[in-house]
Image: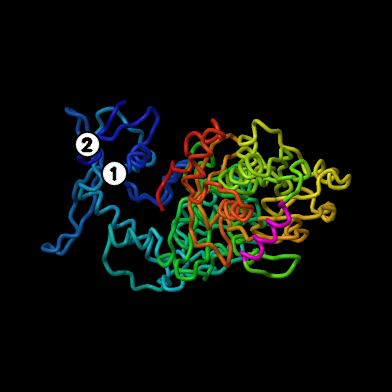
């Protein structure tokens, strides 16, 4: 692979790559605002300027500039090399580029920073971007001087409502146009544009429109400053109090890689952010996925229930075991869940196959929804492919077949993972069962019809593996501790097996995964969730 020298480091590059692209891939940061690896090149912020040394025998391109001479108390003409934006500069074999080691580059970046901050309001204490703002970071790294302009700054509209999810502050905007390019190039809805010129520039929404496409929160995410803020996260938390784990979005079968940001003091998840994975979601997430974190704390089943009344976990497990003991295996149905991880489903599958002795396996999940050709999948379950891969030896049947079996009395007892069903209007059919034991995270059709409900932890409260629609197995890490009395569903299965008098050797997650490996097959090969950036 060809290389070029960046300061004192050899950087490999591929044909067609720019200097900043190759440096980014090599883990070297060249300061930038407008450049983004997933968007077209704008080269308008000029923060990524670098000095390129000329080849031997060729003079450098020089510019004539006026610089203040303190001794002469006058401007004198000087020569300096012409700097080039590295986001636009194609890398070449043997090229020598100066970034951190060039005094001319340092002066230019300091000047760019000063220009961008001339009219920028100093409202960092109330800005949601504080703590992860590039203006703050680059001021410390590349400027570090007090403001010299004494004139009144240019005032622009503040707290503009751009649509259902986004608020815009034009005074903070540096007009990098990332939001404009994202809406045009990725969301395929060119609803944003730039109005006026110079220091009167601001972002505007097309007349008669709102910023309301399915990827609006990404316009806030790509904003390098605090100009665009999400209504959902606005004034909600300070980022320096949050911690992050690598996770997988469970909003649909795409399985976008994400970061789960949570407050360790309150054990509340505050937001999702996309995590780079070029094989799955590139750099993006949809609004549905970004806001799906709210389900972690909403409509939760946090305590065991027996006949609709709250009970202790031991009492509920004892009651569930009593309902299942002595029942003919052919009368028991086990319902797996496309919402839950492979580990949860495999534990229940092992209980059904090895101890309950039933071969009546069904699968349930959330009903399908709207999709597109960008990221959103019509299947709103994160692990349908994983559940299918686990059950290659025994075919999975659908909910209508189970409901018909309950109606005819061929199935009398049901052990179900999850709570959602594809058609919520058919929930009354489960009342035909003599006993329904539901391992549920949320209140829903199954938990409401259940004889015994065991509280299962959400995906944010336990490690788990999910297989997306492309067949990629991805691991999602635990963020917060299990809420209420809930436990990971695989642990509930283990305790239910104990209550039934069986020794299911799955008291640890590592044991579940070791037992699961042969059954999961190729679907579990390659943890794609480990690919990408760090928090």
- Give the camera-side residue of 211 and 59: 211
Q: Residue at x 28, y 35 (%)?
A: 11
> Residue at the right extreme?
408
* Spatial CA span between label 2 and label 1: 10 Å
**Res 122 seen here:** yes
Q: Is residue 178 visible?
A: no
In the rendered image, the vertical position of residue 77 relative to residue 14, given as above or below: below
Which residue position holds label 2? 53
Q: Residue at x 40, y 66 (%)?
A: 240
> Which portion, as a residue range, is magenta?
313-325
Q: Residue 19's mark?
A: none
Residue 36 at x, y percent in the picture: 44, 45
The picture places residue 92, in percent across and down from the top left corner, at: 31, 29
| Secondary element at image label 2 | loop
- Residue 411 appears in which quarter of the rendering? top right
Quadrant for the N terminus in the image: top left
Q: Principal SS element in the magenta part?
A: helix
CB contact under 8 Å: marks 2 and 1: no
- Would you say residue 310 sits in the magenta stretch? no
Coordinates of residue 170 in the picture (x, y in percent): 51, 64
Q: In the image as oriented, which residue stretches furthest toward the left?
A: 71
Relative to residue 449, is residue 149 depicted above or below?
below
| Residue position marked by numbered label 1 in the rendering | 50
Residue 280 vs residue 447, the one in the foreground:
447
Q: Residue at x 28, y 30 (%)?
A: 3
Give how far across and how far down residue 446 sits, in percent. Answer: 74, 55
């Amino acid at each position: 692979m060809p290389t070029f020298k960046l300061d004192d480091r050899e950087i490999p590059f591929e044909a067609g790559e720019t200097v900043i692209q190759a440096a980014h891939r090599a883990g070297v940061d060249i300061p930038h605002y407008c450049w983004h690896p997933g968007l077209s090149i704008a080269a308008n912020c000029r923060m990524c300027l670098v000095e390129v040394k000329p080849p031997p025998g060729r003079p450098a391109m020089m510019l004539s500039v006026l610089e203040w001479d303190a001794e002469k108390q006058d401007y004198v003409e000087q020569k300096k090399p012409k700097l080039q934006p590295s986001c636009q500069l194609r890398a070449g074999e043997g090229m020598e580029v100066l970034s951190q080691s060039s005094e001319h580059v340092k002066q230019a970046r300091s000047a760019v920073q000063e220009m961008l901050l001339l009219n920028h309001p100093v409202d960092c204490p109330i800005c949601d971007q504080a703590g992860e703002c590039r203006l703050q970071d680059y001021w410390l790294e590349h400027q570090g001087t007090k403001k010299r302009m004494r004139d009144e700054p240019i005032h622009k509209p503040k707290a503009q409502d751009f649509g259902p999810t986004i608020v815009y502050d034009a005074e903070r905007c540096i007009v990098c146009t990332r939001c404009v390019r994202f809406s045009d190039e990725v969301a395929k809805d060119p609803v944003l544009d730039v109005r006026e010129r110079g220091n009167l520039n601001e972002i505007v929404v097309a007349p008669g429109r709102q910023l309301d496409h399915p990827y609006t929160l990404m316009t806030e995410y790509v904003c390098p400053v605090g100009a665009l803020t999400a209504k959902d996260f606005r004034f909600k938390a300070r980022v320096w109090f949050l911690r992050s784990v690598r996770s997988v979005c469970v909003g649909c079968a795409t399985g976008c890689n994400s970061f789960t940001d949570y407050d360790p003091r309150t054990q509340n998840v505050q937001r999702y952010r996309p995590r780079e994975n070029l094989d799955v979601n590139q750099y993006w997430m949809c609004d549905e996925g970004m806001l799906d974190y709210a389900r972690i704390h909403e409509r939760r089943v946090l305590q065991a229930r027996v006949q609709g009344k709250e009970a202790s976990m031991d009492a509920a497990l004892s009651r569930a075991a009593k309902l299942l003991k002595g029942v003919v295996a052919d009368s028991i149905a086990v319902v797996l869940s496309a919402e839950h991880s492979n580990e949860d489903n495999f534990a229940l599958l092992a209980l059904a196959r090895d101890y309950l002795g039933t071969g009546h396996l069904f699968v349930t999940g959330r009903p399908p929804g709207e999709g597109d050709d960008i990221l959103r999948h019509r299947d709103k379950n994160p692990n349908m492919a994983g559940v299918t891969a686990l059950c290659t030896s025994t075919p999975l049947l659908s909910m209508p077949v189970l409901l018909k079996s309950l109606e005819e009395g061929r199935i009398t007892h049901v052990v179900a993972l999850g709570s959602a069903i594809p058609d919520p209007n058919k929930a009354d059919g489960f009342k035909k069962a003599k006993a329904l034991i539901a391992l549920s995270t949320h209140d829903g059709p199954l938990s409401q019809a259940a004889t015994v409900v065991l509280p299962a932890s959400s995906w944010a409260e336990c490690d788990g593996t999910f297989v997306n629609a492309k067949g990629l197995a991805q691991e999602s890490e635990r963020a917060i501790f299990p809420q209420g009395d809930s436990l990971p569903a695989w642990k509930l299965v283990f305790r239910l097996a104990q209550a039934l008098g069986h020794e299911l050797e799955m008291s640890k997650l590592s044991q579940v995964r070791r037992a699961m490996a042969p059954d999961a097959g190729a679907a579990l090969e390659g943890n794609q969730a480990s690919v990408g950036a760090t928090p």
